[in-house]
Amino acid sequence: MVHVSALFAVLGGLLPFSGLQLVSGSPVNDLKPAALSKRFGGVPDDVTVVPIQWRGSLEEGGPLINLQGDSFEDIEKQAKALNPKCTIFTEPANNTDLVTRQTEDKDIHCDWPPGWGNAQYNHIMDGIAYLRGISGDCRAPPGPGNCGRVSCSWGAAIYYCNDNPHEHWVRCAKIGDVARAIATKCYGWAYFRGQGFDKGNWNTIIAAGDC
């Protein structure tokens, strides 16, 4: 499993409307990642990407440090350069009950946003497990409509979006929890997409990615 990017994008038109139905793409076999992403449309052509920002402590009781990189692996290298004994990766919490409540409580829209490609379920679940194992906080630039690609492998991506006029920080692992709630509600075929809105005027998207 390869996770290659954690990038921010300026996006528009992400607000949902009522009456959504789940319409998933048909499975496609034996496609390379680039072809798979292209097959399912990826993201809109007007996306502009910038590196993600991560905030956390590199030692118990230590000060919070801000790091920036194109991937969490890149941020991990920077963290280890500052403290070889630290890691930003942790063991994901086993919070199935919490995810169940999130699925019930969140404003989740399946087969959304329009114009985005569908992602393969198994690769999304790998990305969710990966993201839920990231310590610290992730930042989204001031919105509305600013999104970050916090996980992407084999054409399947997870995005963190901010609709506030100011920057927004949230636990990286919580983005994974919301993504898991989206997958629980929206998965019906091998390929799907969806968007889940959380309190604080931010949301998570599961869709195709160019990776």
Image (cartoon, helix red, strand yellow):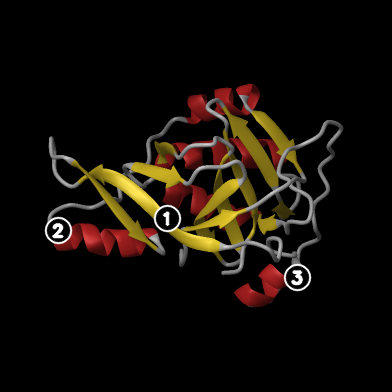
Percent of width and height locating residue 111: 77, 46
Label 3 crowd bin: few (<14), some (14–19), many (20+), radius 10 Å: some
Res. 82 mark: 2
Kindly give the residue lying farthest to the front in the view shown.
165
Residue at mark 1 to residue at mark 3: CA–CA distance: 26 Å
Residue 1 can be seen, yes or no? no
Q: Position of residue 90 (x, y in %)?
A: 30, 46
Instruction: Give x and y (percent) for residue 55.
Output: 30, 45
Q: Which amino acid does label 1 sit on?
A: Ile
Q: How far apart are marks 2 and 1 (CA)?
A: 19 Å
Q: Which quadrant holds residue 185?
A: top right
Q: Which of 174 and 30 is in front in this view?
A: 174
Which mark is first along the chain, 1 or 2? 1
Residue beneath disc 3: 39
Q: Which residue is drawn at 71% across and 61% down?
A: 44
**Is residue 178 among the parts visible in the rendering?**
yes
Badge nearest the viewer, 2 or 3: 2
Answer with left or right where residue 124 lies relative to residue 169.
Answer: right
Circle 2 SS class: helix
Callout 3 amino acid: Arg
Q: Do the residues labelled 1 and 3 touch (CB within 8 Å)?
A: no
Q: Which residue is drawn at 78% across and 56% down?
A: 115
Pick the quarter of the image with the C terminus. bottom right
Q: Where is residue 107 in the image (x, y as percent from the top left)?
A: 67, 28
Q: Residues within 10 Å of mark 2 (few under 14, many from 20)?
A: few
Tell me if mark 1 has few (under 14), some (14-19) or many (20+) residues whose alpha carbon lies within 10 angstroms of its own: many
Query: Which residue is label 1 attached to?
Result: 52
In the image, what residue type sits under mark 2? Leu
| 176 lies left or right of 55 | right
Badge 1 element = strand
Q: Is residue 74 above or below residue 63?
A: below
- Based on the displayed image, in which of its 4 quarters is residue 72 positioned? bottom left
